[in-house]
């Protein structure tokens, strides 16, 4: 939940939470699948979900929004446009035609990798990583590691000096 500075809870969150359909046992037994497609059918709620992030990161000198394929693209592109930042797709393997760096990770239901075009983010940039959901955190870790590679030398000292890496759940 996103708490406001006065300690209250953002009133938009209740509608956002209610708009996400939870499907038990999809795509396999034991998984409670949080389906954001139902939220996308409600333009006002979808807009609120994006605006919460826009409000939070406005005036924070964010130069890039890195969206995780596929659902991170849905929330990441409007966020990037609203912040006046570039959009960097973190894609599943073998989708990007240029030179890439890649990182593998474990999911609740399998393994996968993320790839990013070399040169799409440069040292010194402030980057938001966005996705729809954190489950094991494996995808988020892989995304952070990918961006960390850009910062390989300074990163051995202190990542937070160089990057604003942020991912939140809606
Ligand atoms: O925290 P984790 O355990 O890593 O899981 C979260 C990830 O899983 C989902 O994506 P998925 O890999 O299902 O791909 P999709 O967005 O292409 O459907 C979700 O959109 C996150 O990216
Ligand atoms: N529980 C979940 N709901 C939706 N997407 C997911 N990706 C990984 N785990 C998920």
Image (spheres, rainbow, N blue to C red):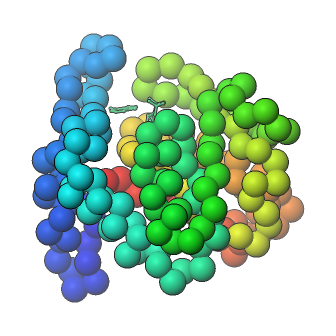
Q: Quadrant of residue 91?
A: top right
Residue 30 against residue 100 in the figure, above or below: above
Query: Which residue is drawn at the image coordinates 79% and 40% (left, top)?
Result: 101
Query: Which residue is drawn at the image coordinates 23% and 52% (left, top)?
Result: 43
Given residues 64 and 136, the one toward you in this image is 64
Given residues 152 and 169, the one toward you in this image is 169
Q: Is residue 119 left or right of residue 11?
A: right
Q: Quadrant of residue 128?
A: bottom right
Residue 100 can be seen, yes or no: yes
Residue 164 can be seen, yes or no: no
Residue 81 against residue 5 in the figure, above or below: above
Query: Which residue is drawn at the image coordinates 55% and 28% (left, top)?
Result: 106
Q: Quadrant of residue 86?
A: bottom right
Query: Which residue is drawn at the image coordinates 56% and 22% (left, top)?
Result: 111
Quadrant of the snapshot with the C terminus: bottom left
Quadrant of the snapshot with the N terminus: bottom left
Q: Is residue 103 left or right of residue 57?
A: right
- Disc tally is 0
Given residues 31 and 63, the one toward you in this image is 63
Q: Quadrant of ligand 2?
A: top left
Q: Position of residue 44 (x, y in %)?
A: 20, 58
Q: Position of residue 85 (x, y in %)?
A: 60, 67
Q: Position of residue 70 (x, y in %)?
A: 49, 36
Q: Position of residue 89 (x, y in %)?
A: 62, 45
């Amino acid at each position: 939940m996103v708490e406001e500075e006065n300690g209250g809870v953002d009133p938009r969150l209740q509608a956002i939470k209610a708009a996400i359909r939870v499907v038990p046992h999809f795509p396999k037994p034991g998984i409670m699948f949080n389906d954001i497609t139902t939220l996308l059918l409600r333009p006002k709620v979808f807009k609120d979900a994006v605006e919460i992030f826009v409000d939070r990161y406005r005036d924070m000198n964010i130069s890039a929004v890195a969206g995780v394929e596929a659902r991170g693209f849905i929330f990441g592109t409007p966020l990037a446009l609203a912040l006046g930042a570039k959009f960097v797709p973190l894609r599943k393997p073998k989708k990007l035609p240029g030179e890439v760096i890649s990182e593998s990770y474990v999911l609740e239901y399998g393994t996968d990798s993320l790839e990013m075009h070399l040169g799409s983010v440069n040292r010194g940039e402030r980057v938001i990583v966005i996705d729809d959901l954190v489950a094991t955190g494996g995808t988020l870790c892989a995304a952070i590691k990918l961006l960390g590679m850009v910062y390989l030398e300074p990163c051995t000292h202190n990542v937070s000096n160089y990057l604003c890496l942020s991912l939140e759940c809606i």
